[in-house]
Image: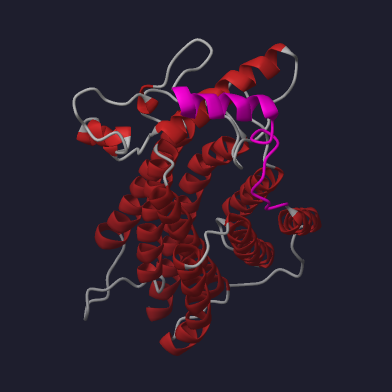
Amino acid sequence: MGLRGRGPPPLLLLLLGLVVATALAADSASASEGDADPLYRACFEKCQRTGTLKEDSVKHCVVPTNDQPADKAWYAHEPLYLQWKEWNCNSECRYHCMMEREQEREELGLGPVKYHGKWPLKRASVFQEPLSAALSALTLLVQFNGWLSFFLLLSYKLPLRPETHATYYEYTGLWHINALLAMNSWFWCAIYHSCDTAWTEKLYLSSAAAFLGYSLILAILRTSNLRDEASRVMVAAPILAFVTTHILYLNFYELDKGLNMKVCTVISVAQLLLWTVWAAITRHPSRLKVVFVAIGGVLSIYLEAHDVPPRWGYVDGHAICLAMAIPLSYLWWSFAKEDAEMRTAAIMKKKR
């Protein structure tokens, strides 16, 4: 694969540096302006005590009358398909008081503020963040479709080695593992945005960290053109050890979301930088797709770091990032397929 005598796009590198600085400087404090609001706190305390709001009541705070134990969470009396959401008196009072207070702020011409570290987003039926859940599910579908087309291309369209019936493409197994981790990550992303509980949040953050960590390994191996197993193990082992330690820390010591954001940002920027430099110095036919994905990745990290407030009760910066992930996932699998075709053609040409 030939090289061009030029460096990576300087503007993109500058943006990467700014994004890293912004993300690492982001305040990870758990206190928020919304839950410190005296009016919100008064509403929340009254709701917990009486189960009533200004114009409504919260059924989860009402003691059942059918001889059920009063100290049992209300969601345990609901149908099984609703119990997993774990909506109880505390969570329902938080949500309804938050919505009431935001409506009052909107009437006064004030913008939204965070409550308990999160933006006030409206529910839809049983979905806690309906837009984000739907976008995550769409990205999962795109990931599955991309992996399936990649699998069919390698297994049935491109030539196989006659002695082993294995593919000529040296990175086939790496892309398959990448697909499994990506689909797992987007599955839990959709679940988490449908139902924000302690266990769905841990699974969401853990699966995302695992996927990003492996993506960095794939970036190093492909951009460095490493093919022998010894070199691959030397690259993968320390990254796997670090990511595993990070996931164990989040799950069994402290769910530090600020730390997790910084770790994921550094990993994301590192792989984007690798792919950007590689795309700039290679003659790969799909290098522009890599550049577009890198630019999209930088914009996503920027939006996540700046934590854009919600609009219309459903759309926030995170939802925009999830929407961007749909075309970026399609482009990325398109690059993977073209890379497999190019590498297979190059190997076949050498064998002749």
The magenta segment is 27-50
Residue 24 visible, this orientation: yes
Looking at this view, name the residue that lies furthest to the left.
Answer: 66
- Say whether residue 49 is magenta: yes
Tell me what residue is drawn at x 43 percent, y 46 percent. 189
Q: Residue at x 27, y 73 (%)?
A: 166
Q: x, y percentage for residue 61?
A: 39, 27
Residue 93 vs residue 225, the one in the foreground: 93
Residue drawn at point x = 41 percent, y = 21 percent: 58
Dividing the picture into quadrants, the one containing residue 72 is top left
Q: Nearer the viewer, residue 121 or 11?
A: 121
Compared across the picture, whether 314 is left or right of 352 comes to right
Number of numbered labels in the structure image: 0
* Display coloring: secondary structure
Q: Quadrant of the C terminus?
A: bottom left
Could you say where residue 1 lies in the image, as x and y percent from the top left?
A: 57, 72
Residue 181 x/y as whole percent: 39, 60
Please check the rendered image and state whether residue 187 is part of the magenta-colored stretch, yes or no: no
- Any part of residue 142 in sight: no
In front of the other: 130 or 38: 38
| 150, above or below 90, in the image | below
Residue sitting at x 40%, y 42%: 190
Task: Determine the image quadrant of residue 69.
Answer: top left
Q: Between residues 70 and 151, which one lies in front from this camera angle?
A: 70
- Residue 26 is situated, as x and y percent measured from the top left of the image, at 73, 52
